[in-house]
Image (cartoon, rainbow, N blue to C red):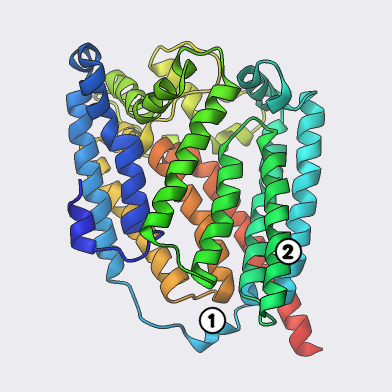
Amino acid sequence: MLLPFIVFRPKDPFQPEFILNAYFILVVALGPLVVAAFFPDLFEHGVYGYAMYLIAIGYLGINFGFLVGRSFLKRGQSLRSLNHPLSSPSAQKVLVKIFLGIGFLGGAIFFARAGQIPIMAENKEIARVDALSVSGNGYFLYLMTLLMVGVAFKAVSVYSSPYRNERYEASAERFLFLVALIVGVFLTGSGSRRYAIWTILYVLIVRHYCVSRLSFRSVLMVAVVAFSAVNLFEMFRNPFSDTTVDFTTTSLFRFVIYASNFEKVLSSFVNSDIHYFGSTFFMDVLTMLPGKQMDYQSWLKEQAGLEFEGFGIPPTIIGDFFINFGEVGVVLLCAVYGCLVRVLYSKCIVNKVYGSGSLVVYVLLLEVSMKVLTSGLSAQMMSAIWIFSVLVFSYFFSLSIFRKRRSG
C-alpha cells in the first residue's frame, strides 16, 4: 500500500498521489484488515478475502491512472491564464455575494419545509433523514451548499488579491474566517458534518497554495483533528446507536463502515452474472423525473436485503465499478478515475489554466473526487453534475463582467 508514496514521492499534501491514496487506505483498504483483527468470525463468514483482492487491484488501477495523468503535465503558467475570467477580482467578489445569498436563502427554505433544524432535534439522525424525505427538499439542500462555493471564492479573493498588504490581509483574513465559521455552523444545522469540515478545508487549501504551504506534519494534525471531530459529532448526532457508545468504538467503526458496506454489496452481486454496464451511474439523475424513482444507495440497500433507518449504503468506488463492469471494470475505471484527477491537479495547480479561479475549480472537484472513493460514481453523479453546472455558471458570469470592464 505504501509503494505509490515511494514511487511518486509527493511533495504536496493536497496532490492526488498523496491525499487520495492516504484517504483510500484509511477509509477503504484498512477496513478488511480491521475486521480480520477485531472481528475474525465476521471476516471468515463474509467475502472479505475477495473484497481485499478487489480493493488491491482497484488501488493499483488508481495509481496507474496517476502515472498516466502525470504524462500530461506541462510546466509553467501561460500568460493567457493570467487574464482568465475566473481570475477577475471584481467577478469573484460578485460571485461571493450571489452564492452566499442564494445559499442562505436555500437553507432557510430547507429548514422551514423540514419544520425544524435537524441538529437541534432530540433524535438528530431521524430528523436529518426526515428533513431530506420532504419532497423537493434535496434541491434546497443543493442550493444551501452554494454557501461553500461562496466561501471558496471569498478565500481566493482574499488570498490572491492584487491589493494585498499586511494590514489588508490581517483584517480580510479575520473576516474570511468569520464567514467560514458562520457558514459551517449554518450548514451543520442540516445534520451533516461534512459540509462544515469541507468549508474549513476549502479555506486551508486555498491559503496553502496562495500564502503559505502546509507541511505534511501540519496536514496530519489537521487530519487527526478532523477525524476526532467526525467521531464526536457522530456521538452527538446519533447517541442511541450501538456504534457510538464511546469514542473508541466510534473511531473503530469509522475504519470498518465503508469496507463493511462494500462487503455487503459484494455478497449480493458476487455470484450474479448480471452487470449493469454503467446504467446505475444515472440512477440518481433519473430521480429528478416525475413519479417515484429509487435512488442508487437505497436500491443497493434493497438488493442487499438490509433494513435500517436512514438512507442506503455507499458501496465505495470499487463496489460501484464491480457492480457495473466486474473485475475488469474495477481496474480500468479506477485507472480512468486516477488519470482524470491527476490531470485536474496538473491543470489547476501546476499550470493554473483558469488563473486564480483554478483553486476554486480544484477544491470543488477534489471534494467530489474524495466522495467518489467512498460512495462510488453512481452515488455522486448528481454532485458532479451540480458542481459542473456551478462552475459553468461562474465562468460565463465572470466572462460577462470581464468583457464589460474591458469594453468600458
Task: Pinpoint residue 214: horizontal percent, then vertical percent.
Answer: 44, 63
Report which residue position mark 1 lands on: 81
Q: Is residue 37 above or below residue 76?
A: above
Q: Earlier in the sequence, mark 1 or mark 2?
A: 1
The residue lying at 67 percent from left, 80 percent from top is 165
- Which of 327/163 is in front? 163
Task: Pinpoint residue 229: horizontal percent, then vertical percent.
Answer: 52, 36
Report which residue position mark 2 lands on: 95
Task: Pinpoint residue 49: horizontal percent, then vertical percent.
Answer: 17, 25
Q: Is residue 291 above or below residue 61?
A: above
Residue 282 visible in image = no
Question: Is residue 318 toward the left or the right of residue 150 in the image?
Answer: left
Amino acid type indicated by mark 1? Ser
Indicate the quadrant where residue 66 lies: bottom left
Task: Pinpoint residue 311: horizontal percent, then vertical percent.
Answer: 54, 22
CA separation, marks 1 and 2?
19 Å
Q: Is residue 244 above or below residue 334?
A: above
Q: Are marks 1 and 2 in contact (CB under 8 Å)?
A: no
